[in-house]
Structure formats: structure tokens, C-alpha cells
Image (tube, rainbow, N blue to C red):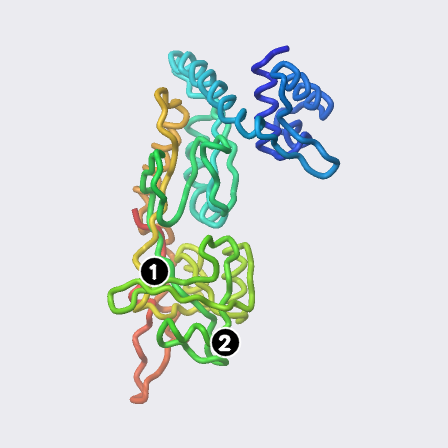
Amino acid sequence: MDRLTAMQVFRAVVEEGSFAGGARQLGLSNGMVSKQISRLEAELGVRLLMRTTRSLQLTAEGEHYPAGACRVLNDLQALEDSLGERQGEVRGRLKMSAPMDFSIQCLMPALAHFRQTYPYVELDLRLEDRHVDLMAEDYDLVIRAGALSDSSLIARRLAGTQVGVYASPGYLAENGTPEVPEDLTHHRCLNYTQQREGPVWSFMVDGRSRKIRLSPTFSCDSGRGLVEAAAQGIGITCKPDFLVANDVANGRLVPLLVDYWCAPVDIHLVYAERDMQPARLRALIEVLCEHFARIGHTMMPDVLATSSTAVRDTTAVNDAGQRDPSPLEAVKPGLRP
């Protein structure tokens, strides 16, 4: 039996969570995948997977085996890639994870440029908002937003985005406008179920960070879905500016509590340090960093040009009959390098 082939099959099954998924990834039949796994277990003398009609679970030995198998496969791939690089080619496979809304809104142009520049690199992009384990799940690169925990991984800042609070003019006309963060506890707030802290929004009050725990009446696992829910008047949402900029510009959403917004949230590239960093990974990191450094805050120039005008009709009029300054005048939607 080809042990390396069996290791590749096992890795694919673990990545996809099923024999059928592993078979699809590798272009093999379900029967061939099952046979490879059985032979691998026989060679090793241990059971790696517990199979039932409904689920597939790793045994204790199976939990330990993928990390070592991935190291062997990655080192072999790096060696083969280095031989190809001597011929002036950058090729191979990259597995990458990134937040869904950020990827759809901001990342795809950079990946299109990467594809044009390096056509022989296969990119496996997983759009998911959960916190993936880069090492255990064998990712080459992940994009993370927010504070990073201490680890041995390498992090490079890609951009920053302002997170703010927004509601529709219709919602505010019906329910009033919150003046301080604590007022949100009396409003219908929309909950993003992928947020690790739960329904907690952070603000700056008197120079200190203050967290407001909410009791949401509406929850959704999609950031874009929550933006649309807020625009339809269902409630108030807390989202990054790149996701709401167009809705603010056309008057569907109004920024709230701007004086209490926290500092912009950083977005990082995260990857493992290797003795032999594959050329394809170095190339992707370089393309992404150059792309976001180049676009800077001009991510959405049409929004920046029209946003202050679009909000004028939704701003309040004070007792003297004068228009209060639009809170958007203090906000510049878009990513910042």
C-alpha cells in the first residue's frame, strides 16, 4: 500500500468530516476511500475512526495522527514545490480560511489578482466565521478580525475596520434614538450568533471600555443578514463599516452613538512559522498585503463621496430649527491599512 496516498485520504476525510466528502475532495469513489482507511488502520495496528451510520468520530489515536501526517505531507509538498521553483514556477495547494462577509465584500479582488499572477496554485478557500484551529485543521493561512490570543503563530496586520451601531430611520421614528450605550437595553437589538462573547457590544465611555450585555429579540449567523434586518426596521445592529457603508450612503441605515464607538478593529493574516515556507504561501501573503496597502481607505470611494449627503434627510432638527450635525460626518467607512 502507498502509505502517503493513505495519509492523504485520511487527511481529506478528517477535513471534510465524512468518507463521502473526502472522496469528493480527492476525486475517488467512496469504496476506495473506505478501503484506504481500513488498510491504513491495519498497517498501524490501531483504529483511527469510529464509524456509525450517522457520524464519523476520531478515536484517541485518530486525534493524534492527523497532525503528524499533515507535517509529513506538507514537508513533502514543500520539497516538491522547491524543485518546481527552480524552474521558475510557483505551484501547489493552499488551504485558507476567512470571514464570510469580509471575503465577499473585500477579499475577492485580491484573490483574483493572485489567481492571474500565479495560475498554477490551487486555492481552497473556506468562508466561515468560526475561530478555526490553524494547526489542527491544517490551514496554511487564516484571516482573523479582532484581538488575537497569544500563540506561536505569526500575525501580520492586513487592515482595520470601524465597528459601529446602526438602525433604520423607520425604526428610530417608531422607537426613539438611543443617546447613551445603556439605552440599548431598552431597544430591539440584533444578535450575531457567531460572536464569541455572545450578545455583548463594546463602547468607549469616559475613556474606558464598557461592555453592554443585551437581550436580543432576533439572532442570525450572517452579518449581511443582520444588516438587511436592521434596514428593514427589525432592530439595531452592530456591524463593521465595510458591511453597512452602502446602506448608510443610500439612507437605509443611520449610525448611532458615534461618540462612544471603540477604536477600529484590526484584521490580521495568521500563519505558522516553518523552516521551509512554501513559495505559494509567501506569494499569497505578499499579494494580500500589497492589495490592502494600496486601496487603504479608498475601499469604497463612491460611498465616501456620497455618504454625508445621503444621511442629511434622516438627521434630527433641534429646537432652534437647525439641523444637528450628521453623526456620519465623523465616520469614514472602509478598511484602513
**183 is higher (above) or lower (below) than 291:** below
**237 is higher (above) or lower (below) than 53:** below
Instruction: Say whether marks 2 and 1 touch (CB < 8 Å).
Output: no
Q: Quadrant of residue 311?
A: bottom left
Q: Position of residue 330 (x, y in %)?
A: 29, 65
Q: Along the horizontal axis of the image, is 222 left or right of 288? A: right
Please name the residue that numbered disc 1 is placed on. Answer: 305
Q: Position of residue 49 (x, y in %)?
A: 64, 28
Pick out the residue farthest to the left.
Answer: 207
Q: How far apart in space, not on screen, are marks 2 and 1 (Cα)?
A: 24 Å
**234 is higher (above) or lower (below) than 70:** below
- Foreground mark, 2 or 1, reads 2
Which residue corresponds to the image point at 46% horizontal and 74% vertical from the top-left? 169
Which residue corresponds to the image point at 61% horizontal and 32% vertical from the top-left? 58
Identify which residue, 61 or 303, lies in the foreground: 61
Identify which residue, 263 or 132, lies in the foreground: 132
Which residue corresponds to the image point at 50% horizontal and 24% vertical from the top-left? 70
Q: Position of residue 242 (x, y in %)?
A: 41, 55
**How many residues crowd mark 1 within 10 Å: few (<14), some (14–19), many (20+)?**
few
Circle number at residue 157: none
Tell me the amino acid under the disc marked 2: Gly
Please name the residue that numbered disc 2 is placed on. Answer: 170
Identify which residue, 202 or 314, lies in the foreground: 202
Secondary element type, mark 2: helix
Which image quarter is the N terminus in?
top right
Which residue corresponds to the image point at 39% horizontal and 22% vertical from the top-left? 278
Tell me the amino acid under the disc marked 1: Ala
Identify which residue, 37 or 313, lies in the foreground: 37
- Mark toward the start of the polypeptide (2 vs 1): 2
Q: Along the horizontal axis of the image, is 258 left or right of 45? A: left
Secondary element type, mark 1: helix
Pick out the residue farthest to the bottom.
Answer: 320
